[in-house]
Image: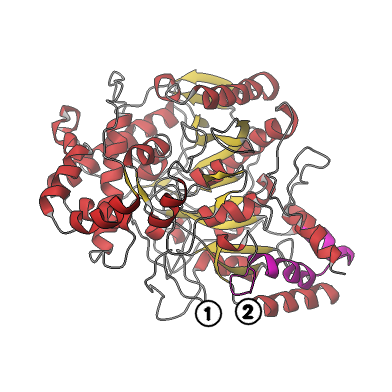
Amino acid sequence: MAESSTPRFYNYPTAKATEVPYKEPPPASNPVVRGLALHYGASVISSVGAIQSFLYNNAGFSKLRKLTELEDVACRYDPAVVPIAEPSSTQQYTQTGSLRAPAQDVSGRFHSVQDFHDAYNSGRLTPGDVVEALLPLIRRDVEKPSEHSIAFLDTKVELVRQAAEASTRRYKEGASLGCLDGVPVAVKDEVDLNGYKKCLGSRKDFTNKLDETSWCVTKWEEQGAIVLGKLNMHELGLDTTNNNPNYGTPRNPFNEHYYTGGSSGGSGYAVGAGLIPFALGADGGGSIRIPSNYCGIFGLKTSHGRISGRPTPSLAGTTGVLGPMAANMVDLEMAYRVMATPDPDDPTSALFAPPRPHNGDRTKLLGVYKPWFDRADPPVRDACEKALDYLITKLGYSIIDITIPLVHEGQIAHALTILSEIASSFPDVTGLTAPNKVLISVGSKCPSIDFLQAQKLRNLLMEHLAYLFKMHPGLVIVTPTTPGAGWHIQGGQGDLKYGVSDANMSVRSMEYVWMANFCGVPALTCPVGYVDPVEGEGKIPVGLMGMGEWGSEDALIEWGYDGEAWLNEGLPGGRKRPASWVDVLDVARGRE
């Protein structure tokens, strides 16, 4: 296909293909440690450099030095690529009239922001009714906390009620701020929220001294959303389970023998269990998409630099972003459009145009790197292939074979980079959980030559993606979100008490998600099926992920709506709600 004209970008990579024959990676052989052995062993590992160096080399980080493909490649440290805002592209799309009607009368329907807005407009309910229905479910500081409260770390009841009272007043006066007014939401404990401590899921205090709220959360509040509080997360965001011995581990709402996924596991649970229509997540290595996938909801990892969290510093400056996790695509779209308002005081966010609905014809082209795609477990692969077949046969998509060089080496480079960034930010591991003592101490052994090799590989991969996007405008690269269905809590209560160090499973869970973080592109996960668990009742959700060109969130959202059509109309049996799902509007009506 001939190259087409491209929108004006800042920092767009040189479009350059690199062809490297696919090579299956060797089986991961990192030691798996759990229970008391981990509890006591972590202190030894974090204080003995020789053990740290052994684990570093055993993880394969030093292999990047041997890549001849990187000999003439320059380093790239910043993956931000910004579509330059045009003077005319300033209109915001956040009012009720711009909402798409959510699906009605479909199997397993989740409540949307529109349902809350309609209930308030009609007078059937008030925001105060909804808040009073939710508080007993989410509060930890009551005599008998509910099963759902473990997803929340803190709720300031007075602040929540004040916001609900203000919203209720606006509706009574006919002065609603729009479709988000009075909608309950919550945020991961990775961002700053006025009146709350920020602990990053740890026992330490990282609260911003100015006691300000992060920009993107402020945008939600300005539209009337009611922030219920801080959500549970994996300590420091450093793994994909959301196993948290500090505050307790929320179980997967679909099956209590599985993790929610992480590190935004509290967000995944709160949305997946029906408590709220959307939540804030953060994603440095799949931490929005993995829990969204495991909890059967939608999640958007945004383009690097688009969403401002100011004054919150990023835990991983060249890989981490903020984004929405949502029950339905309409919720994800609305949450994204508001939170992505450019921040004039953030040097990268300020360059982006405000999000706007995709207009006109849309290329429906999917790219699959088959050897990579096929590494998913058979039940996951089967669920994703059925969804792709629906997109092709019913919705007019075409599919092409693509190649991507060095995908397994790229995952190593991403892991090395994010681990080095976090180790630099948290040199003192005192008081951290045992698994994080191990991870951070190992990350601290990264020599400069390995880090620089990783940044060369980042550049090579970004140039190859630029080549694909220029050759195939509108391309969406599709993979399973994770290669396996969920993460089983294999060690039971011992794992929940002490944590678990299983780098093999961690790496496996991130096999597809890492690329969007390392290269800065947006990626969206849609639930597309359910598979049998290895233990317990309740099938485990499976997700399909699409990656688009830098800044292409609006087009990617259209793809997400098509994925939702499969879930609601094509999937045999339709969408499922977990047994623990809460009909919040019904609970609120029952209080009247």
Name the amino acid type tagged 1.
Answer: Gly
Q: Are dots 1 and 2 in contact, CB under 8 Å? A: yes
Magenta-tinted stretch: 116-144
Q: Say which residue label 2 marks.
A: 159
The residue lying at 46 percent from left, 37 percent from top is 6
* Quadrant of the snapshot with the C terminus: bottom right
Picture quarter containing residue 403?
top left
Which one is in front, 491 or 190?
491
The residue lying at 72 percent from left, 59 percent from top is 95
Q: Is residue 148 above or below residue 445?
A: below
Where is residue 228? Give x, y as percent: 62, 68
Where is residue 462? Give x, y as percent: 34, 37
| Mark 1 → mark 2, Cα distance in angstroms | 8 Å
Q: Is residue 6 above or below residue 272?
A: above
Which one is in front, 440 or 178?
440
Q: Is residue 421 magenta?
A: no
Which one is in front, 91 or 260?
260
Question: Of helix, strand and loop, which one carries label 1?
Answer: loop
SS assignment for the magenta stretch, majority: helix
Tell whether 212 sits left or right of 329.
left
How packed is label 2: few (under 14 Cα within 10 Å), some, or many (20 or more)?
some
How packed is label 1: few (under 14 Cα within 10 Å), some, or many (20 or more)?
some
Name the amino acid type tagged 2.
Answer: Leu
The residue lying at 54 percent from left, 24 percent from top is 379
Tell whether 402 sits left or right of 50.
right
Q: Say which residue label 1 marks.
A: 195
